[in-house]
Image (cartoon, grey):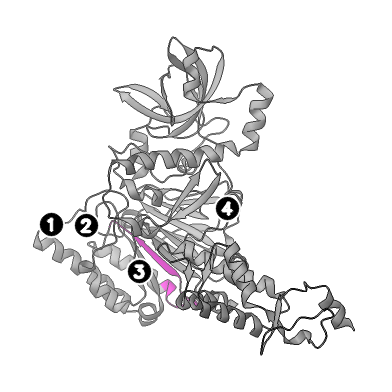
Amino acid sequence: IEKRAILDKLPRSSYYEYRKGPVETGASGAGRDDADYIMSQRDVVRVAKLKGLTLQARVVKRVVKVVAEDETESDDRDKVAFILDGVKRYIDANPGTSRIVDDATIETVIAELSKDEEEMDQNRMQLLNAFDTPKLQYDPARKLFAMEDVHAKGSLHSGPQAKVDMFRDRFQLVMQRLQRNEDLTRKFQNEGVELASIDTLLGGQRGIKWLFGTLCQAEEGVYYLEDLNASVRLNLDNAETAPGLFTENCIVLVEGEMIDGTFHVRMMGFPPPQQRTEAQNTVGYLDMFKTGMSPQQWEIMQQQESTAEDALFVIVSDLHLDRPQVLEKLRKMFEGFCEMAPLPLFIFIGDFCSRPISHGRDGVQQLIGHFQNLANLIGEFPRLAQEGRFVFVPGPKDPGAGNTLPRAPLASKFTSYLASKVPNAMFATNPCRLRFYAQEIVIFRDDILKKMQRHCIFPPRSGDREMDITEHLVATVLDQGHLCPLPLTSRPIHWKYDHALRLYPHPTMVVLADHTEPYNWKYQDCLAINPGSFSSEFAFMVYRPADCDAEDGSAAEPSRIE
């Protein structure tokens, strides 16, 4: 009687069918047994159409079978929706995949969705190179975000439209962040002002205005503010500034007044930042690392992350392999870490030579020899060589195709011997991204501080408290949402891959490896560090992912080998 009461609440259509044959529905439903019913193939097709998918006949039968064999207590309709949502995520993460779902696609999705916690723990770490990073795009008309696979659509070099798209996409990402900021909206409402577009100034209206745009220098020493529609000349003689390093190409918020065709700036600052968790909620679940995980699996990853208390990252920059003293200090480091369980992840960042190698035969052979020496040094510690994980990120002076960002990984000609001796060595681009469970770590090597100081329009001003120059740098990079907000003439960027340098949403940690003193600053909920120069001071950084939420930045600890 209890089973019949539950069954009578279900639709009387052919929503369910016998496992061994079609449903024979009657007015009273006599002769049916609850335990013998599953979702019909027709209903699976209907749900797929609502999600914009077309299933081949074999795929429909496979979905029905998987749902029937599943022993969890969830409703069959929820199970089908879960599988088809996984198919949609897989197609979105793999552009070029047909929306007509075939056997290969459904089997891949079912295998991913069937992973248990142990299997997910084995995939806790993943490296994403710059040229494989999908592009996060914001559609201002629909107010939605989407991922686009740029690498699948063309070559490294692109036409002039890519340059226009680069600046427009940067601007729109910051603009939507600004429009969502409730504190700034409340401030404007209290002061009775509004954020105006530059073209509204053409009417000659007087009074204090707030503008938003990109700093550019159309003439020598003359700065303009530019948005998507217009530009206006700036007078910066009496401008006050918020903390940060203001350079050409920075996106800024300015307060001032229009006088005789020139906007006289009273105050200039960066757009307020957005917390990582808030930005993730705004963007929604977009699988940047192409893991194929569902949101539910991603939540499990976040829970597992807090239990990895023994995980450790050792971050070393300026590892000059041509200096014997560097190799000796590196040997001491390996001696200290080789007995740990589990072994730490070693992140080695260039430059890997104290001076740029010549392009002649001798220079190439010398660098090959340096990496062979490193491989032999690691080989002195058998457990480290066989089980240890190493990530190699090239520096600005390492050999490569030009000095344009992003930089390709070290050529296999230099690293083939090392790769054969150390099976878990990974060779990354500059910049690159590392996933540890649900944490995202961005690694970037450049002498960015000196370049930002050289191109500063104003001397940095600290405001209420004294700030170190590296704090100004961190605030600039994270407020701009970009690793290198410099003019392209001073730091060239591949227009089509500019998105690989963007920092929205903020990562868990960003490594700004620079030839300066080590530092670690917590800005909002993002940790920014510089491991320092190993070649000159034998300094490095130790990062504990389990402590990433520490407010004082103690998750990253500067260390030194005496």
Q: CA distance from mark 3 to mark 4?
A: 28 Å
Residue 34, image x, y percentages: 78, 84
Which kind of residue does numbered mark 4 sit on?
A: Gln
Q: Quadrant of residue 161?
A: top left
Front in this rendered view, residue 255 or 497: 497
Please give the residue where the numbered disc 1 appears in the rendered image: 359
- The residue under the point 48% across, 61% down is 92
Which kind of residue does numbered mark 2 sit on?
A: Pro
Give residue 426's mark: 3
Q: CA distance from mark 2 to mark 1?
A: 8 Å
Residue 558, image x, y percentages: 46, 56
Please give the residue where the numbered disc 4 appears in the rendered image: 280
Crowding at label 1, few (<14), some or many (≥20) Cα neighbours within 10 Å? Answer: few
Q: In terms of secondary structure, where does tag 1 sit?
A: loop
Crowding at label 4, few (<14), some or many (≥20) Cα neighbours within 10 Å? Answer: some
Which kind of residue does numbered mark 1 sit on?
A: His
